[in-house]
C-alpha cells in the first residue's frame, strides 16, 4: 500500500531571478491545489503556495532524460512532495526538447552533473527555500541520461575508452549511443583534465542516488565504481526498447551485484517513466507512448511506491552505504 499523502504539492517554476537554466521545484504545502499544465499535460498542484511549516524536508535533485525537460517526471515529483519531500528539477542546457545540440555527446556528459551541482548550490542559498531543506538528506534521481548523471554525482568514473571499445564492435547495432562516440582526440583531452579516460563529478552532499533506466552502461567499468559508497537504487524497464539490456541494465547489475538494489518494473518500456500520453503526444510522438503490457498509470504507481520506500528507508537509516 502507498503511504497516504500528508501535504498538498506546492509548485514553483523558474525559481531564480536570473536562471542559469530553468528550474522547477515541488514541495510540501498545505495550500489548495489547482489545475496546472506541464507541456500540455494537466495535473494539480498548489502553484506558488507556502511551504508547510514542519520542515526541514529531504531534497531530491532530479535530472531528466536526453532531449527532455524539467517536467518529465512531474507525476513523481508531486507524489513525493505530498509525502514530505522537496523535488528540484533543472532543465539541462544543450540537452532538452528546445535545444538538443549536445544530446548524448561527451560535452553534455560532463556538463549535466555540473549543472546539478550548481542547482544544488543555488537552492541551498535561496532565501525562500534554503531553510526548508534538510541538508543531511540530499538525494539525486534521474531517468535515462539523467540516471547516468546522478550516478556520476555519486562518484562513478564514466569511462570514455570503454564507450569507444563498445562502439568499435556494436556501432551498427546501437546507433543511439554510438553515433556520438568520442574520438581519440577527445579521450586525450580527458586524460589531460582528469588523468585518465574518465569523467568524474562527485558531489559529497548527495547521500543516495536512484537511477531509472540509466543510459551509458557502455561506459561503466568495475574500477569506475570503486569510489562509490552511497546507496544506489536502479529501476529497470521490463522491456527497454531503446537501451540494449546487455550493455546497460544487465551490465550495471553484473558490476554492482550486492552493492545496489535493483528493481525491474513489469510491463514498462524505456519511455513508460514519462507522463501519461495525451492524444496530441500519441499522434505526433507515438514512440513516447509505447508500454509493454501494463497501463502507464499502473507503472507509475509501482515506481512511486518503490522510490518512496527507498527514500523513507534512507531517512530512517534502514539503508546505508558501504
Image: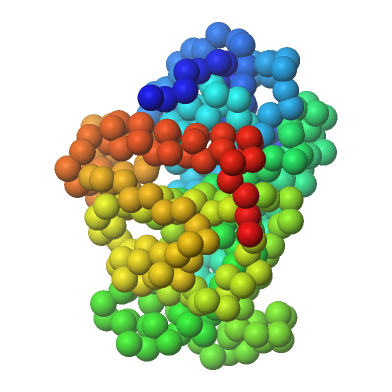
Q: Is residue 157 visible?
A: no
Which image quarter is the N terminus in? Answer: top left
Q: Position of residue 78 (x, y in %)?
A: 50, 27
Q: Residue at x 72, y 23 (%)?
A: 55
Q: Is residue 25 above or below residue 7?
A: below
Q: Position of residue 88 (x, y in %)?
A: 61, 38
From the viewer's perspective, is 253 left or right of 56?
left
Q: Residue at x 41, y 54 (%)?
A: 262
Q: Nearer the viewer, residue 149 or 210?
A: 210
Colour option used: rainbow
Q: Nearer the viewer, residue 222 or 117?
A: 222
Q: Is residue 119 above or below residue 41?
A: below
Residue at far left of view: 293
Q: Residue at x 58, y 75 (%)?
A: 224
- Which of the 4 image quadrants contains residue 197? bottom right
- Which of the 4 image quadrants contains residue 29? top right
From the viewer's perspective, is 313 left or right of 193?
left
Q: Is residue 155 above or below residue 286?
A: below
From the viewer's perspective, is 212 left or right of 195?
left
Q: Position of residue 143 (x, y in %)?
A: 45, 51
Q: Position of residue 114 (x, y in %)?
A: 68, 59
Which image quarter is the C terminus in? Answer: bottom right
Q: Residue at x 63, y 55 (%)?
A: 321
Q: Is residue 187 visible?
A: yes
Amino acid at each position: 500500500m502507498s503511504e497516504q499523502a500528508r501535504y498538498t504539492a506546492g509548485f514553483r517554476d523558474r525559481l531564480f531571478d536570473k536562471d542559469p537554466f530553468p528550474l522547477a521545484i515541488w514541495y510540501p504545502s498545505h495550500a489548495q491545489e489547482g489545475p496546472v499544465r506541464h507541456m500540455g499535460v494537466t495535473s494539480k498542484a498548489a502553484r506558488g503556495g507556502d511551504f508547510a511549516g514542519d520542515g526541514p524536508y529531504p531534497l531530491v535533485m532530479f535530472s531528466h532524460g536526453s532531449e527532455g525537460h524539467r517536467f518529465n517526471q512531474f507525476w513523481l515529483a508531486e507524489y513525493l512532495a505530498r509525502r514530505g519531500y522537496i523535488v528540484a528539477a533543472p532543465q539541462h542546457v544543450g540537452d532538452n526538447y528546445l535545444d538538443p545540440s549536445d544530446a548524448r555527446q561527451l560535452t553534455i556528459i560532463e556538463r549535466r552533473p555540473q549543472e546539478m551541482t550548481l542547482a544544488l548550490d543555488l537552492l541551498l542559498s535561496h532565501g525562500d527555500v534554503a531553510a526548508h531543506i534538510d541538508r543531511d538528506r540530499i538525494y539525486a534521481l534521474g531517468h535515462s541520461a539523467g540516471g547516468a548523471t546522478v550516478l556520476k554525482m555519486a562518484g562513478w568514473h564514466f569511462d570514455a575508452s570503454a564507450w569507444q571499445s563498445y562502439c568499435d564492435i556494436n556501432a551498427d547495432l546501437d546507433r543511439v549511443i554510438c553515433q556520438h562516440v568520442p574520438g581519440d582526440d577527445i579521450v586525450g583531452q580527458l586524460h589531460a583534465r582528469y588523468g585518465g579516460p574518465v569523467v568524474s563529478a562527485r558531489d559529497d552532499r548527495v547521500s543516495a542516488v536512484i537511477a531509472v533506466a540509466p543510459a551509458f552502461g557502455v561506459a561503466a567499468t568495475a574500477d569506475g565504481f570503486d569510489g562509490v559508497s552511497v546507496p544506489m537504487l536502479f529501476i529497470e524497464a521490463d522491456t527497454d526498447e531503446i537501451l540494449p539490456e546487455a550493455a546497460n541494465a544487465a551490465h550495471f547489475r553484473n558490476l554492482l551485484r550486492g552493492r545496489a538494489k535493483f528493481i525491474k518494473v513489469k510491463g514498462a518500456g524505456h519511455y513508460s517513466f514519462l507522463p501519461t500520453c495525451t492524444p496530441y503526444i500519441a499522434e505526433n510522438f507515438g514512440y513516447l507512448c509505447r508500454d509493454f503490457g501494463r497501463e502507464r498509470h499502473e507503472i507509475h504507481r509501482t515506481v512511486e511506491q518503490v522510490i518512496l520506500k527507498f527514500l523513507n528507508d534512507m531517512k530512517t537509516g534502514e539503508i546505508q552505504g558501504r
